[in-house]
Amino acid sequence: MHPRNLVAPLALVLLIFLAWRSWGWPGIVAGTGAGLLWLLLHFNRLMSVMKKAADQPIGTVASAVMLNARLKPRVNLLHVVAMTRSLGEQISPAGQEPEVYRWRDGSDSSVVCEFEGGRLARWQLLRPETPAEGPSGES
C-alpha cells in the first residue's frame, strides 16, 4: 500500500478529533458530515466521468495528437479517462504493473499510456507510416 492512500483517512480522523476537542459531540457530527460530503463529491465525480465514458467506444479519442499534448506526468487514470471521455483499450494483462492503455483516433494515430501505481508514468504518440511519395512534377 502506498503512503499516499493513507493521507485522506488520517486527515479525516484528525479533522474529527480536532472538531471534538473544539466543540464536543456537535463537532464530531460536523466533522463526520464534512468527511461524508467529501466522499460524496468524489463519488459523484467518478460516476459522471464513467457515465460520459460509457457513451463512447473503448479506446477512442477525438485527436491523439491533442491528447498527447494535454497529458502530464503523475496524473491518475481517472483524470485521463475524463480528458478522453473514453475508457482506454487495455494492452497489458489485467493486474500486472505497469498498466498499459491505448487510445486511437480516426486517422489511426494512437497514444499508449503506462500507469504505475495508478499514476501516469510514460506515454508515447504513435502515428501511422505514410507511404513514400514519388518525385513530384516529373513527366
Image: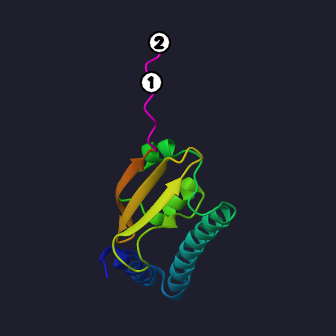
Q: Which residues are magenta?
A: 128-139
The outermost residue toward the left is: 3
x and y percentages locating residue 79 in the rendered image = 49, 60
- Looking at numbered disc 1 in the image, what kind of residue is underneath it? Gly
- CA neighbours of label 1 inside 10 A, class few (<14), some (14 to 19), many (20+): few
The answer to which of 134 and 119 lies nearer the viewer is: 134
Query: In which quarter of the view is residue 58 placed?
Result: bottom right
x and y percentages locating residue 125 in the rendered image = 41, 48
Q: Confirm or deny contact between disc 2 and disc 1 (CB under 8 A).
A: yes
Q: Could you tell me how far apart the alpha carbons at marks 2 and 1 are, in whole angstroms?
A: 9 Å
- Does residue 87 appear anywhere in the picture? yes
Indicate whether residue 138 is drawn in magenta.
yes
Q: Quadrant of the N terminus?
A: bottom left
Indicate whether residue 43 is drawn in magenta.
no
Vertical arrangement, residue 112 with respect to residue 94, above or below: above
Query: In which quarter of the view is residue 44 placed?
Result: bottom right
The answer to which of 136 and 10 lies nearer the viewer is: 136
The answer to which of 33 and 47 lies nearer the viewer is: 47
Per the image, the residue denoted by label 2 is 138
SS class, disc 1: loop
Vertical arrangement, residue 125 with respect to residue 46, above or below: above
x and y percentages locating residue 54 in the rendered image = 66, 66
Q: Look at 50% across and 85% down and name the residue there.
A: 28
Vertical arrangement, residue 110 with respect to residue 33, above or below: above
Identify the main secondary structure in magenta.
Answer: loop
- Residue 134: give its label: 1
The outermost residue toward the bottom is: 25
- Looking at numbered disc 2 in the image, what kind of residue is underneath it? Glu
